[in-house]
Amino acid sequence: MNMTKIKAATVTLRERWQQLTGLKYFWPVFLAAGLAFCVAADRYDFVDLYLQLIIIYVGINIILTVSLNLINGYMGEFSVGHAGFMAVGAYIASILTVYVFPQNAAGILFPAAILAGGMGAALVGFLVAIPSFKTRGDYLAIVTLAFGMIVKSVLENIDAVGGPRGLLGMEKLTTLPWVFFWTVLSVWVIRNLVYSNFGRGIWSIREDEIASDLMSVNTRQVKIIAFVVSSFFAGVAGGLFAHAIQFINPRMFDILKSTDVLIMVYLGGIGSIAGSVLGAVIYTLLLEILRPLGVWRMVFMPLMLVLLMIYRPRGIMGLREARLFTPLLDRVTEKLWRQRKKEARHAAP
Amino acid sequence: MAYLFQQALNALQLGSIYALIALGYTMVYGILTMINFAHGDLFMVGAFFCFLLAVYLKLSFVPTLLVSMLGVACLGVVIERLAYKPLRAAPRVSAIITALGVGLFLENFTLALSPYPKHIPPLLTNTTWTIGSLSISSLQVLVIALSLVLMLLLDFVVQRTKAGMAMRAISWDKSIVPLMGVPINKIISFTFAIGTGLGGAAGVMYGLAYPVIDPYMGIMVGWKAFICAVVGGIGNVRGAMIGGFILGAVEILVAAFFPSTYRDFVAFTLLLVLLILRPYGILGKPQPQKV
């Protein structure tokens, strides 16, 4: 098969894909099929448990990545404390299901626990947003870094939640349908947020904070909302994570965890929902596929990351969005803009 | 009172190690405006070089220190050439993520080669002098004195030599300096060599002072040193030294008067407060944004 044939094949494939995704009922069909698969897999166990756990990890990582992308990608800050928010959510949700809720009702109240975990994390996110009014760039990175370490250190010193030994006793409440629900919810909320009128303010902060201030974007409000939404979903992911592996300790949420999420964000590309989803899926699956390599797996993984960054510094999707996630108006505007640029090029001598 | 002096001495020891590592961060930042997150792991590699040389080649202290510094410096230059140079024109975050990747690579590569924590043999006979109730070990004095000598040397290089002048010039304006005939690539390599070499020296000293080393030791120390660099005002060489001593003092004093598990908590909270009060670090100047 020669090069032209391959090219022709990819073009047809792309056209097919565009036809498919252009259809009005792609999302309803996709979501219904996904939900049906998750419920069936959970109920009838035709997918083995190991695979189920990996799918759960993929979902949790998508939530983490998309929510961090809101701050690091769309708002252009550099937050390195995402695992801290996750820890807050994980501990609050676990305390609720283990100690507070009655034993037999934990299953029914599980969504409430996750929600409470998210709320707690959102509250902390609000506190972290306050220093971001004045500090930016590397200094804000330090603030988030210090925050992450403070969370870990506080958890290590509270004996009621096990201190450094960790907390256990959670039932395995995180099931595929729940992960599916929260993943879809987080992607949907963040996608709608960044493409809303208000959300364009988030983009404008990335491009130029002072200019957006002058254009009457309320930058403080925008920052608070972005941090709160992002940390809410990080807390949700933490709660799901805790009830998937049924044991948490403060060291699980250290700087390495934050680094993992950062890598997924930048692997997928900043400022792109599709990129975040891709980054999370690829990173999680690659880590699992390379598992036979043992310790060397973690040697090859960073090497691949470095090579990717050198040859494709913006990540897989960097600042581009899949058609599936862009609003119709944006697509039309971009098309018009491209056309006009083309015309201008032809008009110029 | 003697207790306080004793702790102050410990603080100086820890602080000088932090300061040496922070210098590497701040020098690279000053010249490339890039945070080299692999620096903490280069510090770890320094400690492992020290282990290898001391155990397998049975070198004494001075050659161990010099060879380790040289080895880490070479590694730093190679990393800069292979991983960071292609990214100079790329967005700043890509370089940061690459640095994180290089750091992870160094950690896990070392882990794959030596899965167990290693113990560095005592390279020097450690004598302890007692003055009143104050006890000073020769190792402590050596670490503090050596760090001070290295820092003075660095200050001399940066402020007084031609290469140092070129470094400062590049950190002012990277686009115009090459036009003046400054070999920018050479200067950047030189900066990396010095910065990582100091990190390697810190690794050796850390290994002597706290002899159990493992591949993940660089993470925490590295991030703390980064905090020192930022507290002092990143890009500022003297600020990094001050930041290192401040963090060392805070950590030791907290551990001296509170349960030691509160150390990280208090240290980081203080740093947060400091950053909120002085958002650009102690010696850093706020950079006005032009519209």
Image: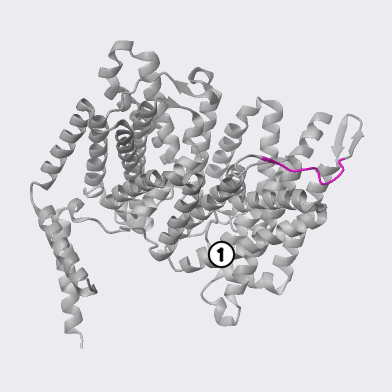
The residue positioned farthest toward the bottom in the image shown: A349
- Residue pictured at 32% horizontal, 23% vertical: A113
Magenta region, residue range: B118-126
A306 above or below A168?
Answer: below
Answer left or right for B163 relative to A308: right
Which residue is the extreme one toward the left? Answer: A24
Give the residue drawn at x 51%, y 68%: B85
Quadrant containing the N terminus of chain A is bottom left
**Residue A71 can be seen, yes or no:** no
Relative to A349, residue B200 above or below: above
- Whether residue B236 sits left or right of residue A243 in the image: it is right
Q: Measured from the top left, where is residue B16 in percent x and y?
A: 73, 47
In the rendered image, residue A280, in percent from the top left (x then y), is placed at 34, 46
Q: Which residue is mark 1?
A: B80
Q: Label 1 is placed on what type of residue?
A: Glu
Q: Could you tell me residue B203's position as x and y percent?
A: 69, 49
